[in-house]
Amino acid sequence: MDLTQGFIARLLERGGIGGADRERGRFRSFLLGALNHYIANEAEKARAQKRGGGVTPISLDVREVEEKLRREPADMRTPESEYIRRWALAMLDRAVAAVRARYVAEGKSELFERLLPTISGGRGDERYRAIGAALGMSEDAVKMAASRLRKRYREQLRALVAETVTDPSEIDDELRSLIEALR
């Protein structure tokens, strides 16, 4: 069982989710704290099992290891920052999925798929002209459709973030945190 499955199993077995309290903070902060606690406990168990295990130590060529490390790019992300970054990406994915579902329900799935690359504000008359030609729309109509898509996306993202906070006044702060996590 890997670390993630073990964490979730332990959390569910011991009713750990019941320990989350909205008054004490955000749910993802609770999960991050619980995960850090779990990892520390697992690391301690692993060290205890290896102590004096009768295994013959293996000699490492330090120069070879140092050379490998020197060639690898430095990764300055912490587990906490990576957790927050993945949360942000998951929120963006959920927003895109919800907007996609709305376009599909309206019978506009091809328009959505062609406009999706413009969702982050990427513009270009060449792109709009090509999309318009492919869909039988004018360039201005494509621009308006792209603007509406971005608006729906922002609204959906805001609604998803609103579900994660206890006070609506925290939404803008959470959106800023989400954007910062992706930098």
Image (cartoon, helix red, strand yellow):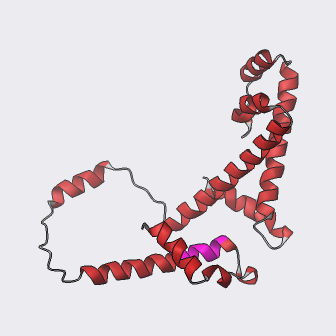
**Rendering quarter of residue 122:** top right
Look at the image and give the residue range highlighted in magenta: 28-35
* Above/below status of 17 relative to 174: below
Q: Main secondary structure of the magenta part?
A: helix
User: As drawn, is 109 to the left or to the right of 92?
Assistant: right
Residue in the picture at 57% in, 73% down? 32
Task: State whether residue 82 is above or below residue 34.
Answer: above
Query: Is residue 31 rendered magenta in the image?
Result: yes
Task: Please give the count of numbered marks on the rendered protein.
Answer: 0
Residue 66 place in picture, x, y as percent? 23, 57
Q: Looking at the rendering, in which quadrant would you find the N terminus?
A: bottom left
Query: At x 61% / y 53%, what residue is drawn?
Result: 182
Residue 41, magenta (yes or no) = no
Residue 135 image offset from top left, x and y in percent: 80, 19
Q: Position of residue 170 (x, y in %)?
A: 80, 68
Could you tell me residue 78's position as x and y percent?
A: 49, 65
Residue in front for this viewpoint, 122 or 14: 14
Q: Nearer the viewer, residue 108 or 60?
A: 108
For the point 29% across and 52% down, the residue is 70
Please tell me which residue is depicted at 49% across the width and 67% down the height of the picture.
4
